[in-house]
Amino acid sequence: MLKKDITKQKLKAMLENYLHEHQEYYTDAEKKYIMENFSSGLFTDFSDALLRQIYSELSLIDDEHNIYLGFTNLIEREFGLDKHILEVGGGKIPCLGKNIVLRQKSGTITVYDPDLITTTSPYKNLNLKKKNFTTQLIIPKPDLIIGFTPTTATDQILEYAFATNTDFMIALSDIFDEVDFYQEEDDIWTHWQKEKIYEARKLVAKNNMGKLMIETLEKYDNPYPIIYNKRKR
């Protein structure tokens, strides 16, 4: 949720000003959605990514409720941050990349997303690529590839990770299909998420990349699975 001193009136004014300054980067439908739901961060940690990224960019989120910090903490715990990290599907605003780079003592973070608002980075070790990531790109091999709800880019992340034997961590998106309408009410993971977990588990074992681990960030109102490989040490 947002900081306690943020009122609904103040929040609305800040978002209106932000959209005015960045209007060319948002469609009319996106702007309409943002303003119709601008106050969701006052009630939940898991607002839509469009809103959540703006909240983070404007420093409106309390640290205890910042899901980007939560994901960064998980990466640090399992892999460390001082390495060369590749993020796929960073969104319009590279909030996760910025959180990571501020805690890195060495290494880099490179973010790919065709919707990035800017490729100008305020940090020398944060590289922004306004393009789609594909496994055909010729790039230096990273130490870790990550994605925070990258939706359709999930397959590219996994394909690259297994082809190059690169460690990975992905917070899976909440993608739904027809099968989900027939699931049990207490079954919170979608059919698509279960399929990705099944595929990843098989390929982690096949490529000798350790064991597939699954966690959630329920503290931040996000019940969806985060998957990553854990090698034997």
Image: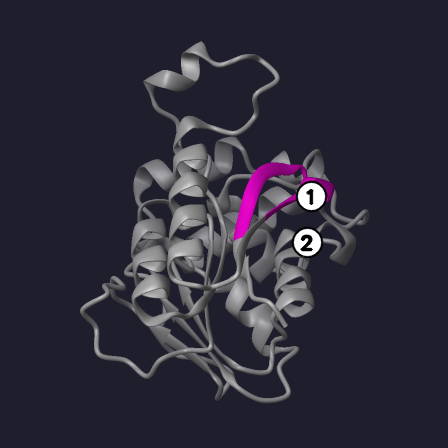
Q: Position of residue 165 (x, y in %)?
A: 38, 70
Question: Toward the viewer: 167 or 154?
Answer: 167
Residue that lies at the very extreme toward the left in this rendered image: 136
1 vs 2, front mark = 1
- Are the residues flagged by discs 1 and 2 in contact, CB closer than 8 Å? yes
Residue 91: in magenta span: no
Lower sequence index among marks 1 and 2: 2
Q: Is residue 222 magenta?
A: yes
Q: Residue at x 41, y 78 (%)?
A: 142
Return the mark for residue 66: 2
- Residue drawn at the location 50% of the way across and 31% of the way down: 36
Q: Is residue 221 above or below residue 71?
A: above
Depth check, front residue: 213 or 129: 213
Specify the principal SS of the magenta part: strand
- Along the line of sight, the residue nearer the viewer: 82 or 78: 78
> Which type of secondary structure does the marked residue at label 1 adopt?
helix
For mark 1, what is the residue? 220
Residue 184: x, y in percent?
54, 12
Quarter residue 164 falls in: bottom left
Q: Can residue 168 be seen here?
A: yes
The type of residue carrying mark 2 is: Asn
**Number of numbered discs:** 2
The answer to whether residue 208 is left or right of residue 9 is left
Q: Which residues are magenta?
A: 214-227
Q: Is residue 39 visible?
A: no
